[in-house]
Image (spheres, rainbow, N blue to C red):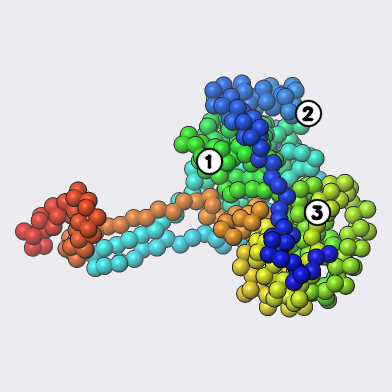
Amino acid sequence: MITWSSLSESEKKAALARPVMKNSDSLRTTVAKILSAIRDRGDEAVLSYTRQFDCTSLQQLPLPVEKRNALAEQVTDKVKNAITVAFQNVKQFHEAQKPQDIRLTTTPGVVCEQRFTALDAVGLYIPGGSAPLPSTVLMLGVPALVAGCERKVLCTPPNQAGEIAPEIAFAAACCGIEEIYLCGGAQAIAAMAFGTETIAKVDKIFGPGNSFVTEAKQQVSQRADGAAIDMPAGPSEVLVLADGNANAAFVASDLLSQAEHGPDSQAILVTDSEQLVVETMQAVETQLAGLSRNSIAGKAMENARYIITSNMNEAVGVSNLYAPEHLIVQTDTPRDLLPLIKYAGSIFVGQWSPESAGDYASGTNHVLPTYGYARNYSSLGLLDFMRRYTVQELSKDGMRNLGPAIMTLAAAEGLDAHEQAVALRMAALSGDAS
């Protein structure tokens, strides 16, 4: 339990410190070697790494559409219906984000436009591990579908049988994803970024992953022959703003739902009520005992923070300093605090809005900036799967009207060729009465 007003500035900084991300020299070197191997040896290297880490008997990287469909059919009707509900909500929310082109006359005879187009090819990385992640397939696949991306390439590690989880296959089918490759880790990122004999290069890579995946994404994004990426990534995190009337059991469940992602996840409660802290800590212990991933969540909760502030305005200030990935507001009048909140990846308003809703089915995207990047990065959205470009057209009158200003500015910058490009046109127009 931490009393915020009693802390020095350095102690406040320490209280909000994130877990140290694994970013050692050995990690960078190992990932660089993997990238180099994929760049030089293509499919053979991807298969070699996949056999080493995931499936010893894997013979090919592509998962045929027929196999995708067969796996999808294994999903129970109950799970199919849940995925379909989530798909429809996420699709509806992202369709509402479609941008409008702009056309504007800035000076008589000068027309400027801004237009949008979908990225041609996107790489969607879905982690493997102890649980299938169809929700991440939806969060990446739906905006790619709505944007109109021509190629949607999904990479995910195979299991020992050389297959993927049926739930992932069904979610991929919902999103119209037919290019699926059985590979994970840094080798999958490299394959999508550089291209291999089987996996054609993509323009941008999306999706979460472990430290190797994160490092690989950062390295390929810095190479001219690589690919762009969605955003920097770090361990998952949640901050709950709650007053003395909040439901301690709800608060505890929200802290634990984030803690179960991994032992380096971070859960923070900021409140003006010492009693709520006591009740929440008790509820955490009770609920933790019944979780199937209690060892993971328990490890994360060892680093949980329970911060007491003088009032809720000060609590919001703490949240703004932290800039959480997920921010849950459980107060009597939660919307009153929204104008004060400056930095958060996604905000969950009121006691009936658990973080789980955004993770799965409310419609918002669960790919969010972590590690304080909410200060300068946004949650994943439709525009991340598109690019904007500008168009300008000058008529004769437009050149007459704007030409002198352009020439003056070019001369001021000492760029003679720029000035001449306009001067030649102005000279041509001087004898043209039309």
Which numbered disc covers residue 169? Answer: none
Is residue 272 or residue 228 the one in the foreground? 272
> First in sequence: mark 1 or mark 2?
2
Report which residue position mark 2 lands on.
Answer: 160
Find residue 126 and report its image quarter.
top right
For the point 76% across and 51% down, which residue is it? 265
Asked whether the beta carbons under mark 2 and mark 3 sit within 8 Å of each other, the answer is no
Give the residue drawn at x 53%, y 50%: 385
Q: Nearer the viewer, mark 2 or mark 3?
A: 3
Classify mark 1: helix, strand or loop.
Answer: helix
Q: Amino acid at mark 2?
A: Gln
Whether residue 429 can be seen here: yes
Q: Secondary structure at mark 3?
A: loop
- Where is residue 144? Give x, y as percent: 57, 48
Above or below, comparing residue 179 to residue 350 in the picture: above
**Residue under pointer 3:** 303
Q: Residue at x 36, y 59 (%)?
A: 113
Neighbour tally class for label 2: few under 14, some 14-19, many 20 plus, Cα within 10 Å: some
Name the residue carrying label 1: 221
Q: In the rendered structure, which amino acid carries the disc numbered 3?
A: Asn
**Quadrant containing the C terminus in the rendered view:** bottom left
Q: Is residue 115 left or right of residue 361?
A: left
Horizontal side of 150 relative to 242 (left or right) equals left
Where residue 315 appears, as percent x and y from the top left, is 72, 71
